[in-house]
Each structure stands twice: as C-alpha cells, then as structure tokens.
Image: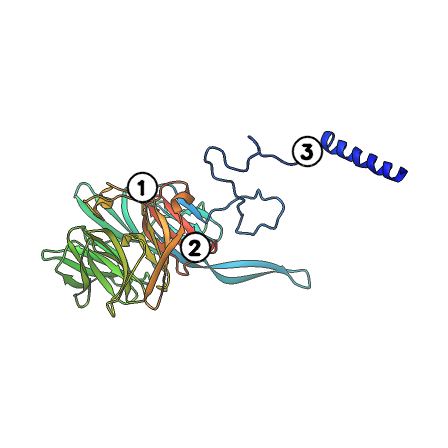
C-alpha cells in the first residue's frame, strides 16, 4: 500500500511540474514562429566561401560568387594571355646562409582597354589585382584587340575632322608594378576605314578588311612584316571570322535578307541562304553555331560544314552571343527566352538598341555531332543587374569566361570551374 502511494505521489508531482513549471526552450522565428518567408522573400540559404563544403555547426558563412565585375567603365576590347614569370624563393642551407632560387612559371592575365582614355589595364588572375599598364591617352576608342599574348594592341578611333575611322597597332609595355604605367610603343597606322578585323587562332596574325571600288581588300598584318595584301572580295558589308585553319568572310546579318559565309584563298561560298544569318565557327572543327531569323522567330543550330548535318538546339541564341572553347568541345551561349521580338526581327532591333536582353548563360556539349544545351547560370540574377552579353570569350584552358555588358560596356569575369561544379 505504501509503495503504491509513493508511486502515485511521484507521478502527480511530475504532471504538475510539466504543465505549470517547465520553461519552453523551443526556438521560434521572429514575426510569428513560422519558417515561411515573409512578404514573398526568398528563404535564406547557407552559402559557401571558396567553394568549401559545410561541415556542420554555424551555417552563416559568406557566399563568394563565381561571377565578378572587373571594370565598371566602358571597355573597348579584352583578351586572356598566359605570361611567363620568374619567381624567387629564399631558403637556408646547413651553414645558415640564405640561398635564393629562381624558377620559371606562368600566370594568366586579363588585358583590356578602357574606351574613354585608351589606357591598357590588366588583371592578374592569380592575385585578383588590377593595375594600369599604359599612360597614353587615346580618347573615344571604339574597338580594340590584343595580339601576341598582350604584347601588341590594336585600337580603332573615329577622326571627327577627317570623318574617317583610324586604326593603329602599338607595342604594350611590360609593366610589373601598379605604380609604373608606361607609354605605348612604336605605333603604326593601318589603312583608313578598316571595316572588320580578327586575330588568328594563335593571336600572332591580324586579318582585316578595307573597302575598295569593287568590294573589299583582305590584308594580313604581323609585327615582323607589317601589312600584306591577301586578296580582293566582291563584297562590302561583311565581317571576318578566323579559325585555326581558315579565314571566313560573312555577310552582315539582316532579318529579311539572306546571308552567306565565304571561305577566302580562294574566295568561295561555303554555306548560307538564311535570313538573319550569323555564325560563330568552332576554332578546331568544321562546325559552327548558326543563328537565323525565321517566320517563327529566332532559331539556332550547330552546322557541320563537312557533311552538311545540323543539330538543332532547344533554346535560341544570337551567334554573336556565343563562344567556343579552344578545343571546340564546349560552347557557352547567352540568351533571354523572355524577350519579346516584334515583326522588325533580329538582329537589327538588338543592334539599334530597340531591345536588350536580360541574359542567362547556357552550356552546350556535343556527342557524335548531336549537341544539347542546358541552363548553366542566370548571370543577370547572379550579377545583381541586367546583363546583355557581347564579345564572349574563353581563356586558353577554358578555366575563365569573360564578356562585356552591352548596356554599359562593363567587363565581367566568370570562374568556369566553380560554376560548372556547382
């Protein structure tokens, strides 16, 4: 009886304590104890620094985006260059003497030209430092391209007095310090009114077009030999495109005029007959990303020049907004599927600025001639602003991808390795 009585008393005390004296230590969220976001905000997710995995515990670590804005002022042109460097290390021998050892290495730079000043800058991708290379002021640079690993730069300006487009090539000084910009060296001018130019696959040679009475003249420029005439072509409204083997001439695209691509030396038609026709050839294979304007809108596919085969893509892109890797096995394209295009068509409306894109980046890979595309990264959301991609380009090893925003001319850089492995 007494054992039963003690048991009942213990149970009664436990019940009274649980309901009247126990403190609730369960955490609650601010604003009502709900895990749902307030006013349509996105749920906050833990993010990572330097792409390191979360190991548990505190999840409030900082997110480092693979996409960064390199320069917020308009950029005329850019290039990646692998530059040899000599590194010095110091050690101590058994006698306590310091020994300096030099070794050769390479580092990748991103060279670019600022439009307003014409100054050359470069970003060291190993240290993320940007510094000025030249102090030669060249206002209102319209376009620029680099040769020979950043050793030469071509700039194009418009002379208001003569009303001519002037183009010159100059040496880029070798600058190793942020505080020592130097002048451009040995400038040499090409012919007036160069209408198109493109570097060779290895960036040692420049090809360019100059209008003549019957069409255009194709020239080849090297630092050693200067300008050399190649051949005349019976067309004027054309642009150049160069692979590792061939130099192509492409008619400027129009939504309602059939376009064609021609091979030079000798000058023969290769492919075309499509309205709004534009293409981005792969550097090492006989394939090309083609865009055209059809009755149903913008249409994109990969065309094989050898067997004539086509591989249609799921999404549509302007060819100018696409770039191949140097091995021709990887293709990035920027596009905006939500942009409405009226009857005026592409690419004219985009060229004139009547429309702009809020781009997403897509990745394309091919197996046995069949290419598939999928979304890789919404770069506009990632960058925090609307990005309309022009002049997209990979570095030699396809570790980095860079482009200019058409809206404001700013230069952006994407870490490809971190993006693909996300």
- Per the model, the C-alpha gap separating discs 1 and 2 is 23 Å
Q: Nearer the viewer, residue 95 or 301?
A: 301
Give residue 260's position: percent from left, percent from top: 18, 59
Write the residue at 86% across / 36% down.
5
**Outermost residue, front direction?**
1
Give residue 56's position: percent from left, percent from top: 62, 48
Per the image, the residue denoted by label 2 is: 416
Label annotation for residue 407: 1
Going from the N terminus, do you reach mark 1 or mark 2 first? Answer: 1
Q: Quadrant of residue 407?
A: top left
Give residue 21's position: percent from left, percent from top: 74, 30
> On the picture, is 247 further left or further right than 103?
left
Determine if residue 348 is in view: yes
Quadrant of the image containing the N terminus:
top right
Going from the N terminus, do you reach mark 3 or mark 2 first? Answer: 3
Give residue 96's position: percent from left, percent from top: 68, 60
Up-down relation of residue 158 to residue 285 (above or below) = above
Label annotation for residue 394: none
Q: Nearer the viewer, residue 317 or 207?
A: 317
The secondary element bearing badge 2 is classed as: helix
For the residues labelled 1 and 3, say whether their Cβ atoms are less than 8 Å apart: no
- Per the model, the C-alpha gap separating discs 1 and 3 is 55 Å
Per the image, the residue denoted by label 3 is: 24
Q: Residues within 10 Å of mark 2 (few under 14, many from 20)?
A: some
**Outermost residue, bottom direction?**
307
Asked which colour scheme the image uses, the reply is: rainbow
Going from the N terminus, do you reach mark 1 or mark 3 first? Answer: 3
Query: Which is closer to the viewer, label 1 or label 3?
Result: 3
Q: Residues within 10 Å of mark 3 (few under 14, many from 20)?
A: few
């Amino acid at each position: 009886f007494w054992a039963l009585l003690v048991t009942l008393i213990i149970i009664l005390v436990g019940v009274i304590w649980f309901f009247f004296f126990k403190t609730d230590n369960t955490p609650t969220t601010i604003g009502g104890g709900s895990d749902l976001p307030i006013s349509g905000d996105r749920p906050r997710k833990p993010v990572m620094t330097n792409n390191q995995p979360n190991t548990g515990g505190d999840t409030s670590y900082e997110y480092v985006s693979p996409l960064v804005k390199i320069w917020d002022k308009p950029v005329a042109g850019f290039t990646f260059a692998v530059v040899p460097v000599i590194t010095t290390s110091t050690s101590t021998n058994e006698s306590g003497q310091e020994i300096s050892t030099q070794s050769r290495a390479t580092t990748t730079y991103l060279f670019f030209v600022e439009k307003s000043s014409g100054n050359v800058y470069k970003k060291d991708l190993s240290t993320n430092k940007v510094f000025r290379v030249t102090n030669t002021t060249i206002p209102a640079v319209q376009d620029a391209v680099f040769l020979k690993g950043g050793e030469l730069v071509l700039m194009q300006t418009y002379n208001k007095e003569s009303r001519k487009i002037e183009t010159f090539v100059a040496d880029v000084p070798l600058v190793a310090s942020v505080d020592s910009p130097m002048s451009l060296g040995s400038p040499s001018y090409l012919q007036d009114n160069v209408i198109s130019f493109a570097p060779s696959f290895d960036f040692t040679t420049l090809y360019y077009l100059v209008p003549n009475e019957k069409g255009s003249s194709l020239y080849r420029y090297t630092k050693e030999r200067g300008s050399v005439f190649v051949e005349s072509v019976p067309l004027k409204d054309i642009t150049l495109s160069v692979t590792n083997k061939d130099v192509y001439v492409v008619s400027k695209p129009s939504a309602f005029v059939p376009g064609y691509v021609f091979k030079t030396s000798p000058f023969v038609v290769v492919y075309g007959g499509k309205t709004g026709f534009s293409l981005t050839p792969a550097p090492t294979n006989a394939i090309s990303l083609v865009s055209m304007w059809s009755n149903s809108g913008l249409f994109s596919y990969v065309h094989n020049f050898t067997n004539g085969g086509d591989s249609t893509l799921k999404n549509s892109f302007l060819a100018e907004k696409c770039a191949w890797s140097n091995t021709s096995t990887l293709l990035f394209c920027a596009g905006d599927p939500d942009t409405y295009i009226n009857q005026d068509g592409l690419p004219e409306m985009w060229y004139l600025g009547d429309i702009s894109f809020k781009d997403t980046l897509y990745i394309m890979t091919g197996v046995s001639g069949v290419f598939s595309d999928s979304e890789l990264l919404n770069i506009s959301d990632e960058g925090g602003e609307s990005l309309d991609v022009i002049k997209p380009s990979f570095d030699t090893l396809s570790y980095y991808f860079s482009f200019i925003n058409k809206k404001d001319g700013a230069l952006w850089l994407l870490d490809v390795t971190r993006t693909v492995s996300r």
